[in-house]
Amino acid sequence: SKNRFDYLKAEEYFDIHQILDTATFATLASTHSSYPKMHWEDGSLHVVLIGLIYNMNDSNLKEEMRNITLKLKEKDKSGIVSFVDKADGDYIIQLYDYDSKRVTIFNDYSGRLPFYYSDDGDKIILSSEVKFCLRERRKTTIDKLSVAERLLYDFQLGNRTLFKEIIRLQSAEMLTIDKFGLKMEKTVDLHYNLSDAYRSKKASIDNLVDIYKESVQNRVSTLKEKGFHIISDLSGGYD
């Protein structure tokens, strides 16, 4: 029979499956078989990871999620702050605590992967695509300022979308949904203050080269380990 969520398929070869279903919260995935994703359960914790983290193996990652959840039980977000500060990758992570029925969602430093949320009164809608929020909301309103920004800059500024009721998660942000409702917080702030200034221009350049080499090696190793092919594109186009 036709799945009512078939409209989420970007292509015919995409699959839609439910990876979490409770009385208060459900999670659907619309992906193809090669899309980088993971989900697992660990006691009272259910984790969904979309994207890749290049400087941690799966064992380290699961231990990090376990420690984050223990701290969140004490209303301490320092575990997430520490993780975002050191995790090198493009990712969105969703944590569901079966005991407290609390949902926590956070992303990486750059926030490249899109994620949207919308409070519709009796339900909160979360998605990596705006069209899901549009379908599941009762009503939406065009944001004229966002339309003007789109026409002028080809994107919307800040957390706005083309619809007033749908908000985009920005970089290094964290959503919490519990019995008190929805709350958004920053996890880490980008800053350019040098606490340990380099003694010379060469020392600065050498350090940047080392970081770059380590970053490339981590990506090559992770992609090979997970069976992905590495393709390098050079483009002179609009991007």
Image: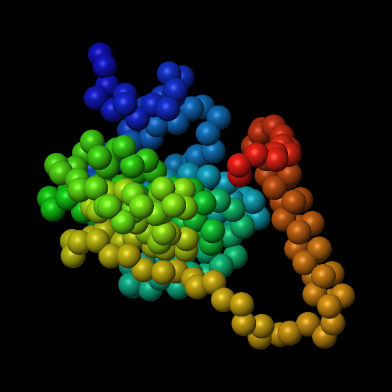
Q: Residue at x 69, y 32 (%)?
A: 229
Can you say which quadrant of the picture contains the N terminus?
top left
43 or 194: nearer the viewer: 194
183 or 167: nearer the viewer: 167
Residue that protrudes farthest toward the top in the picture: 1
115 or 46: nearer the viewer: 115
Q: Can residue 130 be seen in this view?
A: yes
| Quarter occupied by residue 183 | bottom left
Horizontal and vertical percent position of residue 51: 53, 45
Can you say which quadrant of the picture contains the C terminus?
top right
Residue that protrudes farthest toward the right in the picture: 202
State the colouring used for the structure image. Answer: rainbow
Q: Disc count in the image?
A: 0
Q: Can residue 99 be seen in this view?
A: no
Horizontal and vertical percent position of residue 197: 73, 84
Q: Residue at x 13, y 53 (%)?
A: 121
Compared with 128, 33 (above or below) is: above
| Quarter occupied by residue 87 | bottom right
Horizontal and vertical percent position of residue 80: 46, 66
**Left or right of 129: which side holds 108?**
right
Q: Which residue is drawn at 24% across and 48% down?
A: 142
**Left or right of 7: which side holds 65?**
right
Compared with 32, 211 (above or below) is: below
Q: Residue at x 40, y 49 (%)?
A: 150
